[in-house]
């Protein structure tokens, strides 16, 4: 089952379907995350890939899927919004937890996964193995999403340059 098959994965959907239909989660589709994807697409990717890894490693796939989906549950453009009390990397997990707690009863593990998913950019490591999975998948996903944007940007510039060179001859 590939990444695009998350809708057909009945176990995964059993864990996250109630969250996916929530207006607060659907609202993430209105925000660009890493140039190329919406925040909702990013969160689903992190959730599903993390869930599959947790399942393969016999860890808590439910907590991993749910926390992965809610890890970026905030509603501002992180490129332009700045905070007096800390960086986006430190602030947004706290906002995501607060927003997630309005939707569902978080387990201590889910809360820790969301709160510490920026480990590496912040100093506090996850308490659970599932937190490391979400943190690493989040970084991998963000890098992939940005590189896709960079690839498109670069190839369109190269295409323009080569076409210009052909016309100039």
Image (spheres, rainbow, N blue to C red):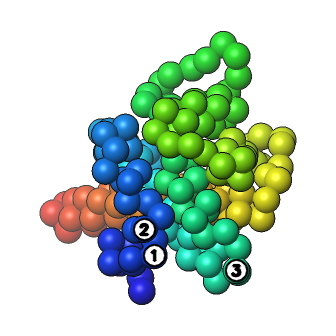
| Whether residue 94 is situated above or below residue 34 in the rendered picture | above
SS assignment at label 3: loop
Quadrant position of the N terminus in the picture: bottom left
Q: What residue is shown at x 60% (from left), y 70% (from top)?
A: 61
Residue 78, numbered circle? none
Quadrant position of the C terminus in the picture: bottom left
Callouts 2 and 1 close, C-beta under 8 Å? yes
How crowded pointer 2 is (Cα within 10 Å; few <14, some 14-19, many 20+) is rated as few
Residue 11, numbered circle? 1
Q: Nearer the viewer, residue 155 or 168?
A: 155
Q: Which residue is mark 3?
A: 58
Residue 112 % position (x, y) = 72, 47
Residue 141 % position (x, y) = 53, 61
Q: Which residue is mark 2?
A: 14
Q: What residue is shown at x 72% (from left), y 47% (from top)?
A: 108
SS assignment at label 1: helix
Going by the picture, which residue comes out furthest to the bottom? 1
| Whether residue 159 is situated above or below residue 70 in the rendered picture | below
* Lower sequence index among marks 1 and 3: 1
How crowded pointer 1 is (Cα within 10 Å; few <14, some 14-19, many 20+) is rated as few
Q: Nearer the viewer, residue 152 or 49?
A: 49
Measured Cα–Cα span from mark 1 to mark 3: 14 Å
SS assignment at label 2: helix
Measured Cα–Cα span from mark 3 to mark 2: 17 Å
Going by the picture, which residue comes out furthest to the front? 105
Residue 35 % position (x, y) = 40, 47
Quadrant in the rendering for residue 83: top right
Quadrant in the rendering for residue 161: bottom left
Measured Cα–Cα span from mark 2 to mark 1: 5 Å
Q: What residue is shown at x 39% (from left), y 78% (from top)?
A: 9
């Amino acid at each position: 089952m590939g990444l695009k098959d998350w809708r057909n994965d009945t176990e995964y959907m059993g864990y996250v379907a109630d969250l996916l239909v929530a207006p607060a989660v659907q609202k993430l589709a209105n925000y660009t995350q890493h140039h190329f994807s919406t925040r909702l697409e990013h969160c689903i990717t992190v959730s599903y890939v993390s869930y599959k890894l947790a399942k393969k490693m016999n860890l808590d796939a439910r907590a991993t899927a749910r926390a992965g989906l809610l890890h970026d549950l905030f509603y501002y453009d992180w490129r332009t919004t700045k905070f007096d009390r800390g960086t986006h990397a430190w602030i947004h997990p706290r906002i995501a937890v607060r927003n997630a707690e309005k939707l569902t009863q978080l387990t201590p593990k889910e809360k820790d996964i969301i709160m510490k998913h920026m480990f590496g950019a912040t100093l506090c490591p996850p308490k659970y193995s599932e937190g490391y999975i979400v943190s690493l998948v989040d970084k991998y996903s963000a890098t992939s999403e940005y590189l896709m944007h960079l690839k498109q940007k670069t190839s369109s510039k190269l295409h323009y340059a080569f076409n210009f060179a052909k016309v100039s001859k």
